[in-house]
Amino acid sequence: MALLRPENPQQARLVRLLRDEGPRSRVELGDLLGLSRTTLTTELDRLVARGLIETAGPAASRGGRRSSLLRLAAGVRFVGVLVGADRISVAVTDGELNVLAEASEPADVRQGPEPVIGRCVELAGKLRAESGGAEPTGVGVALPGPVDDGASIAPTALPGWQRFPVRDAFAAELGCPALVDNDANVLALGEQHAGIGRTFDDFLYLKLGTSIGCGLVLGGTLYRGSTSSAGDIAHLPLSEDGPTCACGEVGCLEAYCGDAGLTRAATAVARTGRCAPLAARLADAGTLTVSDVAAAALAGDPTAQALVRDAARRLGQVLVGLVSFFNPGIVVIGGAPEGLGHILLAEVRGVVYRRSAPTATGTMPVVLSDLADRAGLVGAARLASEHVFTVD
């Protein structure tokens, strides 16, 4: 049975609080939201009757008669979907966005949206069965690159997906509301809910990998901009004569620092023979991957390490401008190649702290996310929950 949405702003505030803070007593809910006892009792009783919240056992005693804890109903389920350039990940969460079951597997997005979405739906059904069989309350989907009206636009990482109605396809297949956003925004939401961003009202999430993006949380709210393209930093020009980017321009940030840019630079130095490990790997495999660069750098090869540091310096240069403009409380970096995170972080920190105004960075940490793909899955579920738990 599909669960109903909140009827009014008071109910919406209550269910969002239970989502973010977990089970609470009636007294705690009243204190946190500033609702009168009569209003609180009325709205909680309505939410219980509608099947959105339920009793979760006795609350801690505060003297006198013990009250009961309330929580989101066990039947609340969200599906989070993360589509990458070569991989899909799917998770089912409860109402508090705790991951109950998840799966990840390679995928060729160049096959087009239909087979990829079909496989995501199959995985969601399998995970739903593993986690109790409840129908999904909502589904959130993260796509690499810009998103508009539930569809991918200008998708260099998703060839053949241009304007395909991803949102409508998931909603029809899973029978629940569906929301779609770009992966940097979704990762920022996941970091806000379950990561270090939880303790900051203003932070930047820098997403690395095949595509590069930035999620902006300002005043505790994800900032998308007037046309939902805020944080689209992948194609900021860093030079007029740099490498050609997938977008067709030259010298873009992503052309230098994305996975393709890093492997392109690594291939060039391997062919000169200046990096023996990469040259040997190129001769054996015919191509290089980011993992190959990471392995050479971690083994101590100075040329491979220089490649990583050069990319990190360019990332740092872009962050200097973002930090000076937005003045975030923290910068969180996710998607760094396995094993290279701390090399990247040290170089990025050096540039940011050296080039930014002390008033902007005096108390601002620059850190690596410790959530990995979990940030995207939780963030996608959060995206869906924001829609379901908001009154139209």
Image (tube, helix red, strand yellow):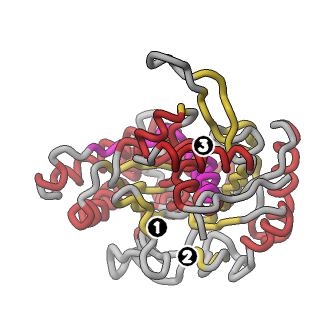
Task: Using the image as rendered, state which of residue 22 and residue 301 is in the foreground.
Answer: 22
Task: Using the image as rendered, state which of residue 79 and residue 145 is in the foreground.
Answer: 79
Q: Is residue 249 magenta?
A: no
Q: Are marks 2 and 1 in contact (CB under 8 Å)?
A: yes
Q: Distance from label 1 to label 3 (Cα)?
A: 23 Å
Residue at 80% x, 71% y is 169
Please tell me which of labels 2 and 3 falls first in the chain. 2
- Say which residue label 2 marks: 246
For numbered disc 1, what is the local secondary structure? helix
- Say which residue label 1 marks: 254
Nearer to us of marks 2 and 3 is 3
Q: Residues within 10 Å of mark 1 (few under 14, many from 20)?
A: many
Task: Using the image as rendered, state which of residue 264 and residue 282 is in the foreground.
Answer: 264
Give left or right: position of 196 versus 135.
left
x and y percentages locating residue 254 in the rendered image: 46, 67
Q: Is residue 337 visible?
A: no
Q: Which span of residues is magenta-colored? A: 365-385
- Say which residue label 3 marks: 374
x and y percentages locating residue 158 in the rendered image: 67, 71
Residue at 57% x, 52% y is 379
Residue at 49% x, 76% y is 228
